[in-house]
Amino acid sequence: MTEHEESILIAGARENNLKDVSLRIPKNRIVVFTGVSGSGKSSIVFDTVAVESQRQLNETFTWFIRNRLPKYERPSADAIENLAPAVVVDQRPIGGNSRSTVGTMTDIYSVMRVLFSRYGTPSAGESSVYSFNDPQGMCTECDGIGRVVRLDLDKLLDTSKSLNEGAIRFPPFGVGTGQWQIYAQSGLFDPDKPLRDFSKDDWDLLLYGKGFRVPRRSQNGSTGTNTYEGIVERFDRLYIKRDMSGLTERNREVARGVTSEAVCPVCGGARLNGAALASRIGGRNIAELCRMEIGDLIGVLEEIDDPVATPIAASAVTRLRRLEAIGLGYLSLDRETRTVSGGEAQRLKVVRHLGSSLTGMTYIFDEPSVGMHPRDVDRLNALLVQLRDKGNTVLVVEHDPDVIAVADHVIDMGRARGRAAARWCSPEPWPGCAPPTPRRAGACAARRGSRRRSASRRGG
Ligand SMILES: [Zn+2]
């Protein structure tokens, strides 16, 4: 390979605030981009390298698939060459719904499922029956969510008021609505009697009655009948026993005002059905293991001594140790990913990529040290090194000197303010690059030295 093939080449980049920037970014290295806000480091790394890489990758797919992928405009530049597929590892929340957990996101949960299907007693069957996202494994009461939403009567009803006075504090059932009519004008109740004076039979009828029809009076005087349904029955059917995502955001908000969420009474929050939960290893079921802190779970898995189970447990331990090594040992596999912080999210993403066997990728980090404890910055650096040593290019936009210290190469977009080129520290700058400043040149000589040392360590 020539030197140029070992580098990403950018000529005449003009994206956003860039003013004809030309750069050579060495591949298979950790390259940190520094510079004040507005210097163009994000424009180069995210809006030029990442966007063009994604755009070119998308072009390799068929039209049918391409139409389903996000569209990227070609970044403004004269030339961008030698790109590798890029993965942006940012601090955006992982999001996802409540079915996404640390365990599912890192794929460690699927190893746990295999472990239980082979070694749990009694085995519940193949690994999918231990999945709370599979109908074969999920608790049918909560559909594998572990929580149930219940109508909260204390929030819904003001028992000091009568139906005519607006005892039902839920706008879709408010005074004058069709829903209200079913209760207030059905002839079943005294609409002027405060609910607290209702008899037990009245309450049963009001909340749970069903299976008969009641008279209806329309605005225009015509009459007919409505199917009667107690408030709880009706609310459950309209708002709880349906996919809430089908409701408008406003209706969902209103419904949230009169409901409360509780741990599923059937699975106790374990998300799984009885067969999956009956299966145990060392006295614990899969949900109990996933509730443990990762550090403790490692200890339990390491005690497994069985020709079939030990290799599977060891595979889980390898992945769990990566989480522990980056300071996430306090998390549990059942933690929902939508509840983790931005910094935790970024580190989880790194761990997921470390588990991948792809090499030759470009990983792009956006200020990964933000909000991180100094101890964790060291751990982050170790992960960046691991990604590089697996044969990847690691680009980092960062201010933190502790992260900059791990760089093989620093591109300082600093005082140039997007003009001309980044300060360049390679011995042979790509045409158009500014000559190296003495300070940077010195820093890079030191870095090259340290890289040689670490390379020889890796080789040995
Ligand atoms: Zn349940």
Image: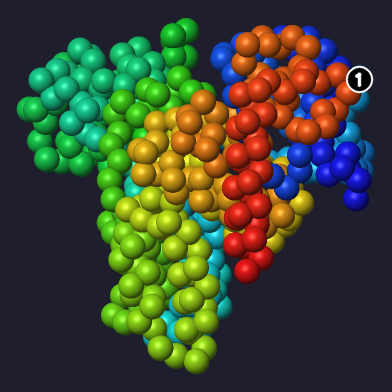
Q: Which residue is mark 1?
A: 78
Q: Work out which residue is located at the far left of the displayed protein and give it.
A: 197
Q: Residue at x 46, y 36 (%)?
A: 402
Residue 254 occupies which quadrant of the picture? top left
412 in relation to 324, above or below = above
Q: Work out which residue is located at the far bottom of the displayed protein and give it.
A: 307
> Which of the pair 210/2 is nearer the observer?
2
353 in relation to 134, above or below = above
Residue 442 occupies which quadrant of the picture? top right
> Which of the pair 459/61 is nearer the observer?
459
Mark 1 surroundings within 10 Å by alpha-carbon count, few (fewer than 14), some (14 through 19), many (20 or more):
few
Residue 245, horizontal then vertical, whole percent: 52, 34
Q: Residue at x 56, y 15 (%)?
A: 36
Residue 140, horizontal then vertical, whole percent: 43, 60
Q: Residue at x 40, y 24 (%)?
A: 253
Left or right for 403, reference 193: right
> Which of the pair 204/446 is nearer the observer?
446
